[in-house]
Image (cartoon, helix red, strand yellow):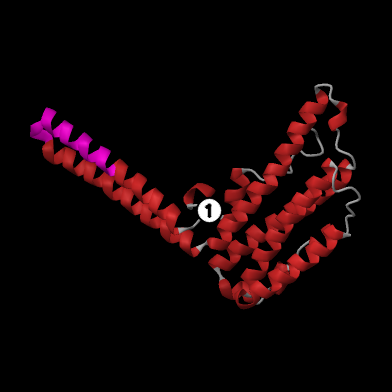
Amino acid sequence: MRSDIQGLEITVGELKHLSGAGPDRLYRPATTTKFAREGLKTVGLIILVLISCLLLVMIFPRAYLFWFAIHLTAIAGLIFEDVWKIRCSRQNKHLINLFDDVDRYNGIIKAIEINDQIEDAGNSGVKIGGRSKVIQALQLIRDDLVRALKTERIFRENKKFVATNSELFTTNLISLNALQISDRASEQGRLLNEALQVALGVQAEMKKLQNPDSAKKKTWKILVRYAALVST
């Protein structure tokens, strides 16, 4: 990995530190279909646990109470974890959306890294033009993602505090829009457009946190602004 993109990726450890929750502790996406699938997986695991219990009781009948206790504890743990994840997923849809934005952002970093490897292998034609502009855009996106994750956590843990600190909702989207995309057909243009889409997602979530009632109207204005940008 080249030095200019080192440290740009948001790692799982950093994500847990910023949000106070690991991505693996939530179901993504938080939909009824996803919950049903995970529930079926849990039912399958419970069936396997029951089969294991039955076999052990048949082999060691004198210790049947012990085996019952062990396996019932395991079943209770599976059910509790499933219910807890579903509950947290339903209550933290903003956080899930931000996790998705982080995945998309990290995907751009990975695409650049692979492109660099191809270039280093002797394929000079794949070199990213205006690389510094792409890196600048990604740094702005990263700053907004970090701010959004911190703000969401504060909002989740202390809604009254967030309500009295509106400055937390400022983002770098204006600065990002100021970066001119001269050739959208190039690799640089494609990466910058992907970065803008991530930025729009982050700002939409920030606006929802600030004012859920007007989120749709504000998101629409953002999309109109983005459409005007890419059409120029």
Q: Identify residue type, mark 1.
A: Ala
Give the residue at the far top of this rendering.
122
Q: Residue at x 84, y 21 (%)?
A: 122
Identify which residue, 81 or 43, lies in the foreground.
Answer: 43
The stretch in magenta equals: 46-63
What quarter of the picture does the C terminus occupy? bottom right
Q: Classify residue 83 as left or right of residue 31.
A: left
Identify which residue, 79 or 167, lies in the foreground.
Answer: 79
To which quarter of the image does residue 51 belong?
top left
Q: Residue at x 17, y 42 (%)?
A: 68
Residue 28, position as x, y percentages in the image? 51, 52
What quarter of the picture does the N terminus occupy? top right
Q: Residue at x 74, y 65 (%)?
A: 223
Regarding mark 1 in the picture, which secondary structure is present there? loop
Above or below for 124 versus 48: above
**Which residue was labeled with disc 1?**
21
In the rendered image, residue 50 lying in the magenta stretch gets the answer yes
Residue 221, position as x, y percentages in the image? 74, 71
Q: From this viewpoint, is residue 175 visible?
A: no
Above or below for 34 versus 52: below
In the rendered image, residue 16 lying in the magenta stretch gets the answer no
Residue 34, position as x, y percentages in the image? 45, 52
